[in-house]
Image (cartoon, rainbow, N blue to C red):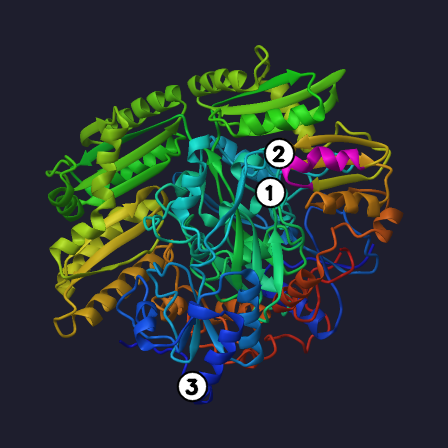
Amino acid sequence: MTLTMPTADPAVLARRSEIVAALRTIVPGEGVIEHPDGLKPYETDGLTAYRQPPMVAVLPETTAQVAAVIRWCWDNDVRIVPRGAGTSLSGGALPLEDGVLLGLSKLNRILEVDYVDRVVVAQPGVTNLAITRAVEADGFYYAPDPSSQIACTIGGNVAENAGGVHCLKYGLTTNNVLGVEFVTAAGDVLRLGGRGLEPPGFDLLGLVVGSEGLLGIVTEVTVRILPKPESVRALLIGFASVEDAGRCVAAIIAAGIIPAGMEMMDRPAVQAAEAFVHAGYPLDVEALLIVELDGPATECTFLVDRVEEIARANGAASVRASTSDQERNLFWAGRKAAFPAAGRLSPDYYCMDGTIPRRRLPDVLGRIRALSDSYGLGVINVFHAGDGNLHPLILYDANQPGQLEQAESFGADILKICVEVGGVLTGEHGVGVEKRDLMPVMFSAADLDQQKRLKCAFDPKLLLNPGKMIPELHRCAELGRMHVHGNELPFPDLPRF
Amino acid sequence: MAESLRPDTTQQLCDAIAAAAAGQTKLRLRAGGSKDAIGSPTPGVPVLDMRGFHGVVDYDPAELVLTVKFGTPLAEVEALLANEAQMLAFDPFDHGRLLGGSRGAATIGGVVAAGVSGPQRLSCGAARDHLLGFEAVSGGGEAFKAGSRVVKNVTGFDLSKVVAGSWGRLIALTQLTLRVVPRPPSRVTLVRRGLDPDAAVAAMARALGSPAGVAAAAHLPAWQGSPATLFRLDGFPESVTARADTLGKVIGAGPLDSLRDDAGDALWDDIRDAVLLPLDRPLWRIVVAPGKATAVVAALDAVDWMFDWGGGLVWAVTAAGADAVRAAADAAGGHATLVRADAETRTAIPAFHPPLPGVADLEASVRRAFDPAGVFDNGRF
């Protein structure tokens, strides 16, 4: 593990029993965990390559307790790492040796459902899927659907700006959150946004969503819910080449169709998924596309026909349109099982998450395959093709010396390619610890300084989730004065009117 | 009028802002000036004219992405997109008519910086939801970028959100990358006559909670002589017909009247530009939870009003004082912006709803993070 985390403060470690006692005065009973056995479940998240038990874990049950814990930590200069369900794939919830792990799983109630305003108000520990479950009988759902939705929490979704297969049409978390109750680094409780479509003043809510726990802790979330579409259908389209599949994706968009979901799998992913779940995927294709369309039945029928035409015009080797929900779910079963299917091919796999402009798909896939050959590590590719979000799964064996490092290096190379072709380091998994040190690949020093200044505006003591997202920030004072150049010129040389 | 600086390059812009920061002076960002009459007048504050940043940098219809310089006229951008059967989903508009003049001055940068979104915002999101990335110069005179050119991106803090709608109070944007969407091939506007305000909000809530896929929903208490609740549907013609049928069943009480094409488009333009309301009193834009819309207008004296966004946006022309308007918005959990008034009123009354105390402190910190010397804190807001 080459990752460098903020150095543990010996003075804080020496005060451990005092810190535990203070937290116990705020959160009584079993809500404070200090025994190593009890801390074990918190030592890692969905990025299991990194492990570090926290100094202590605290599981508050109310906003007041959350605020009191944070205020105490602020007053005593103790670092905090927030955690929802711990499903982060970027190490966003990786603890610190000298940090308090602030678990929000006990704040797990849905507080209100309102069908006039079409909102659900939920505590942060409510799972993503539980929101849909609470409203589906009345014909509604919550749109963002990360693949971990059965486990991941809405608070974690807000922190990571979680996506899912349907965000091409319905947006990410940030497009579906209307308001939050928010505890600042100093322990003050604020409301950002509300139930209206626009927050007053500066859109601080928009900054907080996706801030990976670096700006504050969310203790309540108001999300927009949508009416369930009348019908949903999917097409399963096989192609003899990745280029054909890429052209088909572009042609669907060019026809003015925004599918609810558009997923692509490459040949190794198709083979692995089919062997695992027997979804009936064609095995003689280089690329397989799942296109999901939703809306009134008339619209779905119309669009299914249109997409089929477009697919055939772009050289599709096979096209199947679902005629029942059962069949549609079978189409998805293979895609959804891609990760466990990878787990059958290899003892370990490492899931990447870059985004590229759609048209670069064939080119980037070719380069990933070339890297696979040169590293000697297998890779299977699944994409959210509609929005260019790649999830290459790098296959490796952690028990073979050096393979984890090779896999990480391979992953970093893929992300550098994503940036090089005009894309980004992460489409939905977050920067966390995983991509922190790659940030300079995408951003200049000036770009990163602006991000750091923002962090310092919210958390001047750098106590909230330090070591995540932002490379090399040791103290806010280090940022110093903003670079001002040209101040020898009382008035610059400009056209004047 | 105060001095005006017109940089043509990012370096010139950096120099101008750095000089202001070093000299402890203020700047007011301006492009087309279509919204000059919003906020307090700022005589004596030099204007930083952003029209030197003009033109399309990159437009790739297949990627649904447009990169454009700040001062490019909105009309030019819309024409470019229309040529490819695409559009900006957040329904931006020129404030010319709303402020008593004519259209044509608004720029793409201006509408994004002011977070200007029309009726379709209800279903398609606001400017903040479609700004994927930008290039800018901070209040310290430093050029930087944020975001990206792809739709799905969570790399770093999402600065686009706080910059859209910041009204030039944080940074000087120079270049924007926006998501664009296909233009729906057909549109129809359906009308239900005679509903009182509560019944109208309830009907709009039912419609928006149905699978009819309503793109916009508004209520006019007196349109051509009687209350009119309006629904806009768009999409493929086959789909629009099916949706209209669904909507009729959801609203009930017989078939809905329908306005086709031009008549419907013109009406939505009038709603968006708020020109259906009288000009004789201050105009307020009040954002609330839809369920509280009727309570807001009931609390105001001498008010003419209409609802957009299914009740989530109340446009009110009222003789009621600013305190009364803001109290009504507060009681509804919303906020009120003074959009149109004479210069004297705008000098006395801040355009924006005052933030809550704790939030005000955080806003101040965020402003300093972008603009440490307060170059853009020029007294307009």
Which disc, if any, is residue B309?
Answer: 2
Circles 2 and 1: CB distance less than 8 Å?
A: yes
Residue A428 seen in this snapshot: yes
Chain letter behind tag 3 = A
The residue shown at (38%, 57%) is: A424
Chain letter behind tag 1 = A
Which disc, if any, is residue A305?
Answer: none
Circles 3 and 1: CB distance less than 8 Å?
A: no
Q: Residue furthest top?
A: B254
Q: Position of residue B112 (x, y in %)?
A: 60, 47
> Does label 3 or label 1 sit earlier along the sequence?
3
Residue B160 seen in this snapshot: no
Q: Position of residue A40 (x, y in %)?
A: 30, 71
Judged left or right of residue A311, residue A474 is right
**Which quadrant holds residue A322?**
top left
- What residue does disc 1 label? A197
Circles 3 and 2: CB distance less than 8 Å?
A: no
Q: Amino acid at mark 3?
A: Leu
CA separation, marks 3 and 1?
A: 45 Å
The answer to whether marks 2 and 1 sit on the same chain is no
Q: Residue furthest right?
A: B344
Q: Position of residue A211 (x, y in %)?
A: 48, 61
Q: Amino acid at mark 2?
A: Trp
- What residue does disc 3 label? A13
Q: Nearer the viewer, mark 3 or mark 1?
A: 3
